[in-house]
Amino acid sequence: MQVVSPEDLVLYKLAAQRDQDLMDISRVLIRQRSVLDVGYMRRWATVLSGNLGRPEILGKLEEYLRKSRGTGEPPGP
C-alpha cells in the first residue's frame, strides 16, 4: 500500500487551499514538525507556485511554518 508523506500531504493541501485543507495543514505541521523535511516542502512549494501561477502557495507554506513554531495553536484559514 502506498502512503503519502506528511510533506506531500501538506503540499497537496496547499494547492487546494479549502478551509478543511488549511486546518489539516496546521495539524500536520504541529504534530510532525520535528520530522518534516522543510527544505523539500519549500522547493516543491516554489515549483507548484510557478507551475500553477499561484505565488501564494509558497507564502502560505511560510506562514504556516512560522505559526507552527509558535504557540502550538493552528492558524485559521
Image (cartoon, rainbow, N blue to C red):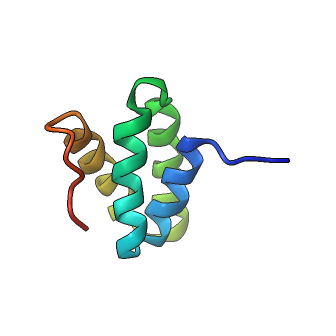
- When the figure is inspected, residue 14 is found, relative to residue 39, above or below; the finding is below
Horizontal placement of 33 versus 51: left or right? left
What's the residue at 28%, 49% (across, down)?
64
**Which corner quadrant holds the C terminus?**
bottom left
Looking at the image, which is closer to me, 35 or 57? Answer: 35
- When the figure is inspected, residue 64 is found, relative to residue 16, above or below; the finding is above
- When the figure is inspected, residue 18 is found, relative to residue 64, above or below; the finding is below
- When the figure is inspected, residue 57 is found, relative to residue 44, above or below; the finding is below
Residue 34 visible at all: yes
Residue 22's quadrant in the figure? bottom left
Residue 6 pos. (x, y %): 55, 43
What's the residue at 48%, 25% (across, down)?
35
Q: How many numbered dots are placed on residues in this image?
A: 0
Q: Residue furthest left?
A: 71
Residue 61 pos. (x, y %): 35, 50
Residue 16 pos. (x, y %): 48, 71
What's the residue at 50%, 29% (across, down)?
37
Looking at the image, which is closer to me, 52 or 22? Answer: 22
Horizontal placement of 73 versus 51: left or right? left
Looking at the image, which is closer to me, 20 or 40? Answer: 20
